[in-house]
Amino acid sequence: MFLKRIDVAGFKSFAERIQVEFVQGVTAVVGPNGSGKSNISDAVRWVLGEQSAKSLRGSKMEDIIFAGSDNRKPLNVAEVTLTLDNEDQHLPLDYNEISITRRVYRSGDSEYLINKQQCRLKDIVELFMDSGLGKEAFSIIGQGRVEEILSSKSDERRKIFEEAAGVLKYKTRKQKAEVK
Ligand code: ATP
Ligand code: MG
């Protein structure tokens, strides 16, 4: 499984619809300060289910919608789609290519889609849980996170290993079942 493409429209600094293609192997995103490099990784985390505006470097979810510039009006919707190559069937869905879309409107309404079909956020979170690609997974390591991993408490560190080993999904379900 690998990330093939990301389509971004109205998300943070990306007023125009942009598409970034990735190939297997290493891709480096380079650009001047403030040009939107971190906004791309924020977009990936957002689609994977990030719900904390603060961790997306804003104060409320609306802050991720393009806020306007000197010559452009603000937009009312932000949309990001990740397209993943799933030929190895790493994700438990019988498709060779999977697209995941998240949309948010200024009104606060949200939409989530898997292969263009409406779904719940929970479906997306579950799809990625244990894949190594969840929002809390080891696949996205933000600035400062390396230090955090090295110095975090043992049970925090354990969570990272559990996600990597593929047992977090079962633990989460067990906990939910016990609460009921
Ligand atoms: P650095 O090299 O400093 O890390 P970067 O390339 O990672 O920079 P980003 O943090 O991705 O840059 O982009 C920051 C830019 O995104 C800022 O100019 C900020 O004004 C813009 N931005 C963030 N949110 C919005 C929004 N909702 N609407 C318009 N622009 C936004
Ligand atoms: Mg940055």
Image (spheres, rainbow, N blue to C red):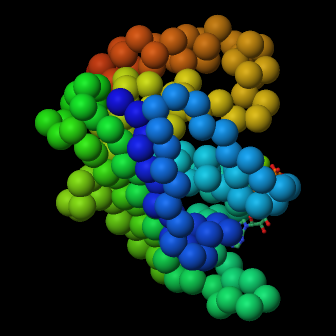
Can residue 62 be seen by looking at this rendering? no
User: In the drawing, does residue 109 fall left or right of residue 67?
Assistant: left
The residue nearer to you, when weighing 178 against 4, is: 4
In the image, residue 134 above or below residue 166: below
Can residue 110 be seen by looking at this rendering? yes
* Residue in the picture at 36% in, 34% down: 128
* Residue in the picture at 26% in, 53% down: 114
Location of residue 60 in the rendering, given as x and y in whole percent from the top left corner: 64, 64
* Residue in the picture at 74% in, 91% down: 71
Location of residue 147 in the rendering, given as x and y in whole percent from the top left corner: 79, 20
Location of residue 123 in the rendering, given as x and y in whole percent from the top left corner: 28, 45
Residue sitting at the far left: 94
Badge count? 0
In the image, residue 23 above or below residue 34: above
* Residue in the picture at 51% in, 72% down: 17
Residue sitting at the far right: 33
Quadrant showing the C terminus: top left
User: In the drawing, does residue 22 fall left or right of residue 90?
Assistant: right
Quadrant showing the N terminus: top left
Displayed quadrant of residue 160 = top right
The residue nearer to you, when weighing 31 against 13, is: 31
Location of residue 66 in the rendering, given as x and y in whole percent from the top left corner: 63, 75
The residue nearer to you, when weighing 16 against 137, is: 16
User: In the drawing, does residue 139 fall left or right of residue 166?
Assistant: right
Displayed quadrant of residue 125 = top left
Ligand 1 quadrant assignment = bottom right
